Image (tube, rainbow, N blue to C red):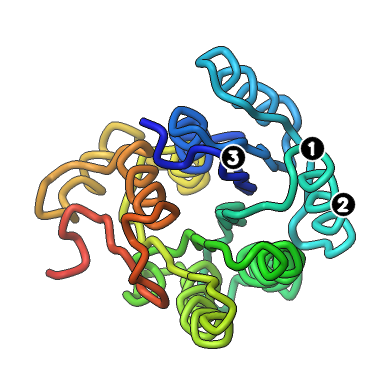
Amino acid sequence: MGRLESQNAVITGSGNGIGKAIALLFGREGANVIVADVEENAGLDTVKQINSDGGSAVFKQVDTSELGSVQELITFSKHTFGDASILVNNAAAFVFGSIESITKEDWYKVFGVNVIGYANCVKEVLPGFRQNGGGVVVNIASISSFIAQPDFIPYNSSKGAVAQLTRCLAMDLAKDNIRVNAICPGSVRTRATDRHIKSLGLNPDEAYKEFAQDALMKRMGRPEEIAAGALFLASSDSSFMTGAHLVIDGGASID
């Protein structure tokens, strides 16, 4: 406990799923948490859980694809807890399909949130990071960053960009004592996974069994297991890591 004591963390997409698990864990580890999400009710629920557990958290609604909205978020964070020392880029658009089925709007949406949204958040936290001698960025990428999957073209393309964004940011920002790493989760049961299964018209129980078979460990991951990786990358335990991609997928991507 207390591995993030006195740290100020901005976590996007933290109303549900992996982002929520990260926010709850960071709160238990002593961080002041800005729960940032486009969905107000979900974000407020995360805040309630953190504060009920003895942590410190507030909610700020944000659309990370809009620079002005991100600027408001970081200003709010500074006025609430002080400059952020940790940024977790987790907000995501889940857009799937074949090259024939994808529309221009689909491309704009998935890259607007998954890539430009990440870049917007990093850009806006940099002044505070630099003023305070450094900071940490944790990007939530995916094993979809480096493997091919059928009819996943827009999502995989965006996550591949996140992997390269992580490397380039790590290179450019190391001189400012800013570490940038990514987590690449495999199949994790979240609300987004449930929505994807429903959109495909699949039987949920059968789909989850199939997803579990992709991993050597023959199960899907839990959001809390991804959160543990985020805590490692955000804390001083990973002080000599930057530009790295931490794969947490039960062995799915080595087959």
**Image quadrant where one finds the N terminus:** top left
Number of other residues with Cα within 10 Å of mark 1, as a class: few under 14, some 14 to 19, many 20 or more: some
Residue under pointer 3: 14
Residue linked to disc 1? 80
Residue type, numbered disc 3: Ser
Element type where label 2 sits in the image? helix
Answer whether residue 109 is visible to the viewer in this image. no
**Marks 3 and 2: in contact by CB < 8 Å?**
no
Q: Secondary structure at mark 1?
A: helix
CA–CA distance between discs 1 and 2? 12 Å
Q: Which residue is mark 2?
A: 72
Is 167 drawn above or below residue 79 in the view shown? Answer: below
How far apart, in angstroms, are the residues tagged by discs 1 and 3?
A: 18 Å
**Which residue is found at the position 34% from the left and 66% from the top?**
143
Q: Are marks 1 and 3 in contact (CB under 8 Å)?
A: no
Q: Looking at this view, is 58 or 196 the one in front?
A: 58
Give x and y (percent) for residue 80.
79, 37
Q: Is residue 206 visible?
A: yes
Q: Nearer the viewer, residue 46 or 84?
A: 84
- x and y percent of residue 107 in the render? 67, 73
Looking at the image, residue 119 lies above or below residue 247:
below
